[in-house]
Amino acid sequence: MSRIRPPRLPRWARPRFPDDLLGDLEEGFVRRRTSGSGRISASIWYWTEIVRFLVRIPRLPSGDRGSSPGGLDMLRQDLKLAVRSLVRRPALSFVIVATLALAIGANTTIFSLVNSLFFGSVQVTEPDRVVEIYSSSERDANIGGFNGFLPFSYPNYEDLRDRTTTLDGVYAYTMWPVSIELGDTPERSQVMYVTGEYFDLLGVQAHRGRTFGPTDDDVEGGSPIAMVSHALWEERLGADPAAVGRTFRLNARSYTIVGVAPPGFRGTSTTIGTDIWVPISMVVDVPVWGPLWQNRSGRFFFLGARMAEGRGLDEVRADLESAWATLAEEFPRINGAAGVRLLPLLEARVSPNVREVLAGASGVLAAVVVALLMIACMNVANLLLARALGRGREMAIRTSVGAGRGRLVTQLLTESVVLFGVGGLSGLALALWGQNALTGLQPPSLFGATLHVETDMRVVAFTATITIGCGILFGLVPALRASGTDVSRQLREGDRNASGGRGHVLRNGLVAGQVCLSLVALVGAGLFLRALGEAGDLPLGFEPERLTLLSVDLGAQGYSEEEGRVFYRDAVERVSALPGVESVAVGSLRPLSFGPLRGVIGEDEDPEDPEAGHMVRRTLVTPGYLETLGTPLLRGRALEQGDDADTEPVAVVNERMADMFWPGQNPIGQRFRLRLPATDISVVGVMETTKQVSIGEDPAPEYVMAAEQVYSPTATFFVRAGPGVAGVSEQVRTELQTLDPSLPVFDVMPATALVRQATWNTRAITFLLGAFGLVGLALAAIGIYGVVSTSIRERTREIGLRMALGAEASKLVAVTVRGSLVVAGVGVLAGLVLAALLTRPLAPQLFGVAPTDALTYGSTAAILVAVAALSAYLPARRAARVDPTEALRAE
Amino acid sequence: MGRDSLGEFEQLVLLACLQLGDDAYTVSIVDEIARRTGREASHSAVYVALRRLEDKGMVTSALGDSTPERGGRPKRFFHAEPQALPALQEARDTLLSMWEGLEGAGG
């Protein structure tokens, strides 16, 4: 057996360690290994001892501190020198540190955002054993904003749970908005309905009181109990221990709080969160679909499961698929066209319906901030290089008094690492501020969740790594260049020829790189800016100007259907009588918002065929709805007063639905069938297709029906004010609350705000890309300016000579500017190519603007060339003004 | 605390040195402290404490033989000097005098 050896010490550390101590440590290491410790734990012990000794060296009697000025002493000396030389040139150091702080701060901010979203903790025991299960469907995969990750019906959930063998258990949950009353006024909140096993399977224990048990969801509507989040308990219930046992009103019922969730737990997702959980059997109270919750056709629930100990993802997937196959066989009409798919919880914590959007946006931002960091690093490298070359004489002197090249490189590297270190710390501070700003932004695609952008150890480690890594990488080239100068030549000639040909090539290359990367960022910003313009021009299918939205939930208030109809009638009457109100209507859904979809088949299609028909959005409306929204009626008639419970069900379909069901035919008079509850409906009109969920979406099918025919307990009032009338929302709210003072009126906003929300992603990316692009441009300008002025300073003698020999100042300026333009031109060309490659994946987010939009590319390139020319012109003009005799004497 | 007074850790190390007699070196002292107090001392800390005690004249040291498990490196054996014991007693008395009247308090 070969001898057990401890890890090797780095060479710089060896002189610090007395032989006898190394012997002691080796003996300790060997004893640990032979008594059964693993290599890693023994090595950790060894390194800990090494560090402990290094830390204690100053406490040794002075005679015992080792012979050569190795290790820490050398480092200390280098640090002292570095700080001194940086303080000596405060302006330069400030520029470098500020540049780095901006770039590192931007990187840390974006990294912490990505970190919180995609790697945020889920507060679940052994999260790698938890999976989320979705229903999939080839058809209709992308409707309803579910992105192909669809919910299940409750009976299908029960069967899947009972027919699988590789899982410890399966839980189901769904979210729904409700009215709650914790204080004096009712308010709107998202509640999560969960099965009894939910908390146990996730391994989540109550902070106070208890969680739900398996029997809590046994009786339909029979357990009005609730768990509340730790945050709600602290902020709304004053962290009162007696809150457990307290009752509060949720919709029309009184619920008892039985427990408080542990701190931080708000569900299993970083993008969907709740503050209140209630047993799933209470979902029967949800207006409209609640009573249908046990129906096999009603896909209302998302599922999750804990894999049994020792079971792998593939085994579980096969198990679920075979269980689903039996369900598809038994219920071909309902389940035949669907499948199952599962995702590990750690992937599903960013809900799959927004994952792509968020991943795309994060990718763009990450690319941009990395580019910004590169620009900043190139700039710093350039400044360091210029300075290092200017210090050729100092280096030569130090070499001639015996400093080895290694020492010089180490010292120059230390300087750059110190600069980067200060920049990194400032960047971290900037990032903390930036995180607050990001947390304040709260993208609307986060459903009920609050985005917490936090700095954890991972973020700090990330920042430290890029800081030190870039410090060494970008400090090394200047250090090697500067230390490699010819001693005797330097001493003889002074600084005059310090920057030889190779130095120029390197620095010009760095400037071209900066130009290239700023161009990419600015092209990105330009494209998104154009996209925003396009989004403003895209037909929405309704007129957002002067339109105000206010929502109510009568079901939550316990209104019966009859009471609800009366309320709508009275409310519409009162509101339309208000001065300044042009028209008013009620609709069950808001445009540009998520809403449930319904299975619809054509009249001649077989209801038993699961492949038949489509998922369609349905909005229940009062007469005057299309007119109030400004949605054009294309054919037939709109819904009228006479369309009520006593007449045949009729609908106005949108153009997209007409094309899907009756291509090439006149849709008026055609009939279609709602699967659940089975209803035949006649088409009386065709309206323009409106945007349902997002501005960039493809046209999706929808129909509107009279709310007198199908009652909706939740509704939005759409109020169009007359031209020049400002702020009707408060008057409308007052009218509604005159009818019912306890009614919460929520989500009050102008329709224009709705549109702004829908373009949030694009606007945020445009803003960030634009900001980063401009910073990049500024850095590139500084870079060009720096290079030109340094090279001119070095050529003062040559310039003076030329001027003395009769060269014209203007010509001199032209030559200098032309030289810089060549460098910038190379950067621009490279940037154009790179931008064309990198922006291609953005196409879906650009609302139809081509990723290679010539206008954007052309104008950005022109701006960069202009900035480059100006940055070269300023120092060149200054040089051309010098007095030739003055310049010659300077040497 | 004066230069010659003994810190708590130094007292531990010095006592272990006295207990071990001729076999006192870093590793055996670490073992002795662990055996008697259950406290896992760091080798480096013990080594540094020994060199400080040597500087204070409490111990002397000499390089000894080497064993293969030490990678051929010598052991440094430490031997307590005559003044070590009175210094330790003084340290104990100092502590005890501070304890007077507190026995049983806070029980």
Image (cartoon, rainbow, N blue to C red):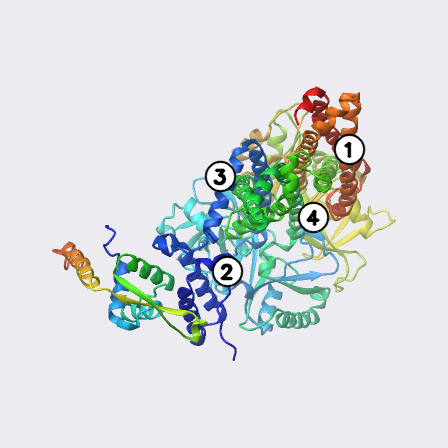
Q: Earlier in the sequence, mark 4 or mark 1?
A: 4
- Helix, strand or loop status at disc 2: loop
Q: Which residue is mark 1?
A: A819
The vertical placement of A49 against A753, above or below, is below
Q: Residue A334: where, in percent of width, then height? A: 70, 64
In the rendered image, which quarter contains the C terminus of chain A? top right
Q: Tag 4, which secondary structure?
A: strand
Name the residue tied to disc 4: A618
Point out the tag, 3 or 2, that comes first from the N-terminus: 2
Q: CA distance from mark 4 to mark 1?
A: 65 Å
Could you say where residue A515 lies in the image, as x and y percent from the top left? 72, 38
Residue A382 appears in the figure: no
Q: Residues within 10 Å of mark 1 (few under 14, many from 20)?
A: some
- Left/right of residue A149 with respect to residue A198 in the rendered view: right
Q: Kindly identify which chain the residue marked by label 4 belongs to.
A: A
Q: Secondary structure at mark 1?
A: helix
Q: Nearer the viewer, mark 1 or mark 2?
A: 1
Amino acid type for the residue under numbered disc 4? Arg
A121 or B32: nearer the viewer:
B32
Q: Residue at x 24, y 57 (%)?
A: B6
Instruction: Name the residue at the bottom extreme.
Output: A1
Q: Nearer the viewer, mark 2 or mark 4?
A: 2
Q: Nearer the viewer, mark 1 or mark 3?
A: 1
Q: Name the mark nearer the viewer: 4 or 1.
A: 1
Q: Are marks 2 and 4 in contact (CB under 8 Å)?
A: no
Disc 1 marks a residue whose amino acid type is Gly
Position in image of residue A664 (x %, y %)? 88, 49
* Dot 3 alpha-carbon crowd within 10 angstroms: few under 14, some 14 to 19, many 20 or more: few
Q: Is residue A517 left or right of residue A432?
A: right
Q: Which residue is mark 2?
A: A124
